[in-house]
Amino acid sequence: PASPSVSEDEDSEVQDREQSQLYPLGSRDTEDSAELWASDDEEEAIDNDRYVTDKVSLQSLHVLSTSVASSAQQGVVIRCPICMDCYSEMVQSGRQLVATMCGHLFCSECLPVALETVGTCPTCRMELTPDLYFPIYI
C-alpha cells in the first residue's frame, strides 16, 4: 500500500499545531530562550503585594492613627540632630527651627555651618546649598 505524500509545508504546519497544543505560550525554543512571556517572579510580587494589603485591617489602621495622635498630644520633642538642643532651648537662645528641602529639621546655627562645610543634608546626604532651607514656625 502506498503511503499518502505530505508536503514539507503541511508537515511543518502539523508540527506547529502539535507544539502549540503542548506549549500554549509558544514553541519549545521560545520557552527555553531568555525571552519571558509570563514570569513567575512578577506574579509572586503581585500576589505578595495583594497579600500584604489584604492583611492590613481597618482596626489596625485605627490603632496606628490613634497612637500617632496620642503621641502628638503627649508632646513630641523636636531636637536638632547636630547640637541635640530641643526646640525650647533653641528659642531661649534666639535660634530658629529650620527645615531642609528634604524635610529634615535642624537649628538655625547648625545647619548653615554643615551646609558650608559639606554641602549635603547631615541626615540623608542630599545635596543642598545654603538657600535650600527655610524657617519653621510652631
Image (cartoon, grey):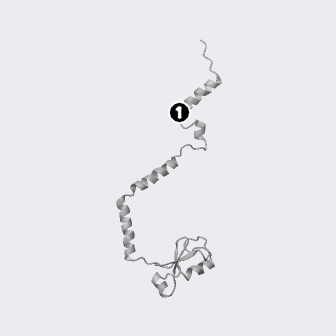
Q: Which residue is mark 1?
A: 22
Instruction: Classify 81 as above or below 94.
Output: above
x then y, percent, for residue 97: 51, 80
Q: Quick one: quadrant of the N terminus? A: top right
Q: Which residue is drawn at the image coordinates 46% and 50% (left, top)?
A: 47
The furthest residue to the bottom: 93
Instruction: Classify 30 as above or below 104.
Output: above
Give whichever of 127, 31 is nearer the camera.
127
Q: Which residue is drawn at the image coordinates 58% and 26% (left, top)?
A: 14
Q: Which residue is drawn at the image coordinates 36% and 59% (left, top)?
A: 58
Left or right, residue 58 beside residue 33: left
x then y, percent, for residue 38: 53, 44
Instruction: Classify 113 as above or below 20.
Output: below
Instruction: Classify 134 as above or below 65.
Output: below
Give whichever of 41, 110 is nearer the camera.
110
Residue type marked 1: Leu
Kind of element beneath mark 1? helix
Mark 1: few, some, or many residues within 10 Å (few <14, many ≥20)?
A: few
The furthest residue to the left: 59
x then y, percent, for residue 127: 61, 71
Q: Is residue 86 visible?
A: no
Give whichever of 117, 108 is nearer the camera.
108
x then y, percent, for residue 128: 60, 73
